[in-house]
Image: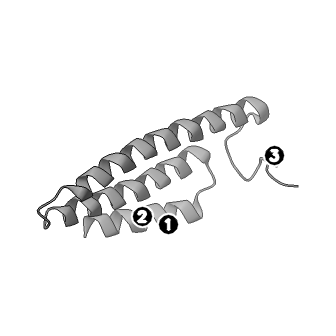
Amino acid sequence: MLASAMFTIGLYGLVTQRNGVKLMMCIELLLNSANINLVAFSAYQPNVNGQVFALFSIALAAAEAGVGFAILIALYRLYGTIDLDNINAMRW
């Protein structure tokens, strides 16, 4: 229940937000809901594969957040805003 609610909120925010920081937070919410599912379903198994995958996913999310925020800082320095509608750098 909790993971599906978190996933829905994250997906809604990902579709509706244009602010770069809010988008990063919504992506992290999506990844954390997947981690909750991995750990919850792993509780029913005798092995710890779900928890290992969750730890790997947390490490991957930390790297993704670091790269994403570095890109947002570079865009802010270049354009003075992190509103993705106002940035034309990724268009042809």
Callouts 1 and 2 close, C-beta under 8 Å: yes
Question: How far is mark 1 from mark 2, CA to CA?
Answer: 5 Å
Q: Residue 77, relative to residue 11: is it above or below?
A: above
Element carrying mark 1: helix
Rendered image: mark on residue 43: none
Q: Neighbour class for label 3 at 10 Å: few (<14), some, many (≥20)?
A: few
Of the pair 23 and 37, the residue shown nearer to us: 37
Q: Residue 78, relative to residue 23: is it above or below?
A: above
Task: Identify the residue at horizontal 65%, vertical 37% (top origin).
Answer: 71
Label located before the other in sequence (1 or 3)? 1
Q: Quadrant of the N terminus?
A: bottom left
- Dot 1 amino acid type: Tyr
Task: Identify the residue at horizontal 21%, vertical 66% (top origin).
Answer: 41
Q: Position of residue 60 (x, y in %)?
A: 44, 45
Task: Identify the residue at horizontal 77%, vertical 47% (top origin).
Answer: 87
Question: How far is mark 2 from mark 3, CA to CA?
Answer: 28 Å
- For disc 3, the marked residue is 89
Which is more foreground, mark 1 or mark 3? 3
Element carrying mark 3: loop
- For disc 1, the marked residue is 12
- For disc 2, the marked residue is 9
- Dot 2 amino acid type: Ile
Question: How far is mark 1 from mark 3, CA to CA?
Answer: 25 Å
Q: How many marks?
A: 3
Q: Position of residue 72 (x, y in %)?
A: 64, 38
Left or right of 79 in this view: 69 = left
- Dot 3 amino acid type: Ala
Q: Neighbour class for label 2 at 10 Å: few (<14), some, many (≥20)?
A: some
Element carrying mark 2: helix
Task: Identify the residue at horizontal 58%, vertical 57% (top origin).
Answer: 17
